[in-house]
Amino acid sequence: MDKDKIDKKDHILDVAERVFSEVGFDGASTRMISGEAGVNMAMLNYYFGSKEGLFLAIFERRIATFRSLLVDINSDGQASPWQKVLKYVDMYVDRIFSNNCFQKMLYQELSVGKRGELSDKINKILLNNVNEFVKIVKDGINSGDFKKDADVQLICATIYGIKNYIMNTPYVSSEMFGFDMKDEKELEEKFKPRLKNYLIALLKPYLVIEHDHTNK
Amino acid sequence: MDKDKIDKKDHILDVAERVFSEVGFDGASTRMISGEAGVNMAMLNYYFGSKEGLFLAIFERRIATFRSLLVDINSDGQASPWQKVLKYVDMYVDRIFSNNCFQKMLYQELSVGKRGELSDKINKILLNNVNEFVKIVKDGINSGDFKKDADVQLICATIYGIKNYIMNTPYVSSEMFGFDMKDEKELEEKFKPRLKNYLIALLKPYLVIEHDHTNK
DNA sequence: CAAAATTAATCAAACGATTGATTAAGTGGA
DNA sequence: TCCACTTAATCAATCGTTTGATTAATTTTG
C-alpha cells in the first residue's frame, strides 16, 4: 500500500536523523543507518539516491515546519514589543526541544558547512528567523519600549546560544543542571519552564525601560 | 636537531587542529592532514601512533593551558563578587577567541563524544571551570551582593553558549554581525569589546542588587 | 475474469575507491 | 656502524554505490 511506503521512508528518515545527530555525517555509515532502520542497504540509494540525498531529505522534511514558525508573531498588531518577545521565547523553547535530534544535526551542519548548497539554504532560513526576532526588538527600540543601546544581535546569539550549548553538551549540561538531559519528561516538566523563566528574567531588565508607576 | 623535531611535531599538530576543526574527526583523512602539513603520511603514525593518537595529542597540548585558566580569580579576597564576575568575563572572552580552532574542535568532540576516555577528561575539566564560576556567583548570592533567585547554572550556559554559537556558526554570525568572523583584527578590535560590554550589561541588572544611593 | 505484461520494492553480492595503518628500503648525521 | 628519521609501496578493512535477480503488486490485454 502507498501508506506503507511513506511510513517506511519516514522511518528511515527518523532513524537516519538520530544516527546523524549522534555521530555526525561522516561518522554515520550507510550500513549503520540501514542496519538500525532494519532495511536493506540498497534501499537508501533507491529512495534517496545517495547518502547526501538522504541527509538532504531529512532537512527538507523539517524545513517545511521551520518556515511557518515565526511568521505570525510579528503581525500581531495588538501585542506590545515585550509581549512579542515573551511569545517568541515561549514558542522557541517549546519548539526546540521537541526536535532534539534534528536541532543537533542542523547545528553540526552549520559548524562544518561542507555541503555548500544545503548550507546556504539553511543559513538563509536561519537568518530569516533571526531577522524576524531582530525586527521585534528593533521595533521595540523605535517605539521607546526598549532601551536604545540594546545589542540586538547579541540578544539573538544569547537565545540561540544557550539552546545549542545545552543540547550539544549533554554530559556537561546533565552534570551542571543535576538531571538527565535525555529524560524527555524532566526536560518537559522541569527544564523548559526553568529556561523560559530565566530568559525572560534575563532579558527584561536588559531590554525593557521600566516606567516607574510607584513614583517613590 | 632536536628542536626541529619538536617544531615539526608542533607544525603537524597546528595543521591537524585546523583541519579537524574545519571538517571534524571523521571528515578529516590522514592523507588530507599530512598533505596540508607537507609531510609523509606515515609520519603521523610514526609520531602519534594513530589518527586518534594525533587527535589526543592536540588536546594534550592545549589542556595544560586549560588548567591554569581561572584558578586565581576566586582566591582574590579583596575583590567583590561583581568584580570577580567582571574579571572572569574579561579573561574568558580574551582567551576564547585566541584558540579558535581548538575551541571548535573541543566543542565538536563534546557534541559527538565517541572517544570515551578523552570525552570524560574534557568533561571533567570543563565542569571544573564551570564550577569555578558557579562558586563566584554563589558566593555573591550568599554575601547578599547578588539576587538570591538568580539561576546560576543558566548564567554559565549563557556565557559559554554565546561564545560557542558565534564561533561555530561562522556564516550566520558573520551575516548577523555584519563583518567577517574570521578576520582576526576585526574580531579583536571590534567584537571582543562589544561582547564584553554586552555580557556585563546583560548580567549586571539580572544579578546585582542595586543599593540605591540616590534615594530619590 | 484470467492470463500476460509492466512496474515497484527488496535483496544478497560485488564493485571500485578510499580509509587508517604497516612495511621494508633508504637517508644522512654522530 | 648505528640510530632516528623519512619515504614510497602496500596492506586489509571499510566506505558509498551499483548490480542483477527475485518477489510482490498493479495494469493491460484478450
Image: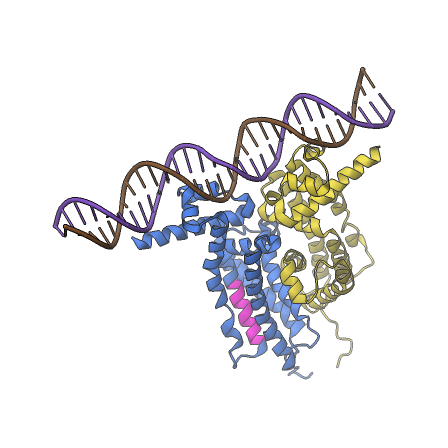
Chain colours: A blue, B yellow, C purple, D brown
Q: What number of labels is visible?
A: 0
Examine the structure image and report whether residue A89 is included in the region drawn in magenta.
Answer: yes
Instruction: State whether the magenta stretch is mostly helix, strand or loop.
Output: helix
The residue range painted magenta reads A82-94
Q: Is residue B166 visible?
A: yes
Using the image, determine if residue A102 lies above or below residue B43.
below
Q: Position of residue D12 (x, y in %)?
A: 54, 27
Q: Is residue B85 positioned above or below D4 on the image?
A: below
Q: Is residue A167 left or right of residue A1?
A: right
Q: Is residue A61 above or below residue B42?
A: below
Rendered view: B147 above or below A40: below
Q: Nearer the viewer, residue A44 or A144?
A: A44
Q: Which quadrant is home to the C terminus of chain B?
A: bottom right
Specify the quadrant that holds the N terminus of chain B: top right
Q: Is residue B59 visible?
A: no
Left or right of C24: which side holds A109? left
Picture coordinates of residue B112, whole percent (x, y): 58, 46
Q: Is residue A190 magenta?
A: no
| Residue at (51, 53) in percent of width and height | A101
- Residue A96: x and y, percent? 52, 60
Percent coordinates x, y for residue B79 in the rendering? 81, 59
**Residue in front for this viewpoint, B130 or A126:** A126
Q: Is residue A121 left or right of residue B123?
A: left
